[in-house]
Amino acid sequence: MGLARIVLYLVFAVVAFVVLSAVVSAVFTALAIIWAIATAVATLALLGAAGYGVYKLYTLLSGSSSPPASSPSPTSTFGSDREAADIEPESRVDRIKREYADGKISEREMERMLEREIDSRETDSIDRELQRDRL
């Protein structure tokens, strides 16, 4: 009976070792996958930062450091932008009215141009509100 008990304990020990080995292997595999994802993200972030640095260096050295006209400058005063935008559409409306009064455009053309101007002014005010919310 002593030999049978030893063999039984030996079988239990081998099974326990196999199960423990499988669990440890699964845990380390999961950690390796997490580590691979983390290093990939860090590498992409580093490459992005390096690319942005090269872009900024290029714009600095090429002399075109001013932002494009379509994007607002973050250093510009928002109030002066609003005043310029408010003055400009009014002068366009006045110009359209003057062209109609001078007979350069027909009434239908004047209405179409005024509608376009009003629509663009509404879009500009919406864009200003969205920009104000972002700041």
Image (cartoon, rainbow, N blue to C red):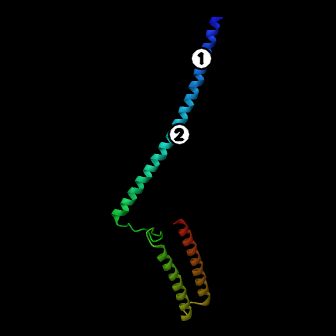
Residue at 49% over, 46% down: 41
Q: Position of residue 118 (x, y in %)?
A: 59, 80
Q: What amino acid type is highlighted by mark number 2? A: Ile
Which residue occupies the extreme bottom position in the image? 102
Please tell me which residue lies in front, 71 or 9: 9
Marks 2 and 1: which is nearer the front? 1
Other residues around mark 1 within 10 Å, as few (<14) / some (14–19) / many (≥20): few
Residue pointed to by mark 2: 34
Query: Does 102 sit above or below residue 15?
Result: below
Query: Does 123 sit above or below residue 103?
Result: above
Q: Position of residue 13 (x, y in %)?
A: 59, 17
| Screen quadrant of the N terminus | top right
Kindly indicate the quadrant of the structure image that contains residue 101.
bottom right
Which dot marks residue 96? Answer: none
Q: What amino acid type is highlighted by mark number 1? A: Ala
- For the residue labelled by badge 1, is the local secondary structure a helix, a strand or a loop? helix
Relative to residue 60, is residue 105 drawn left or right? right
Q: Position of residue 32 (x, y in %)?
A: 51, 36
Residue pointed to by mark 1: 13
Residue at 55% over, 28% down: 24
Query: Does 46 sit above or below residue 62?
Result: above
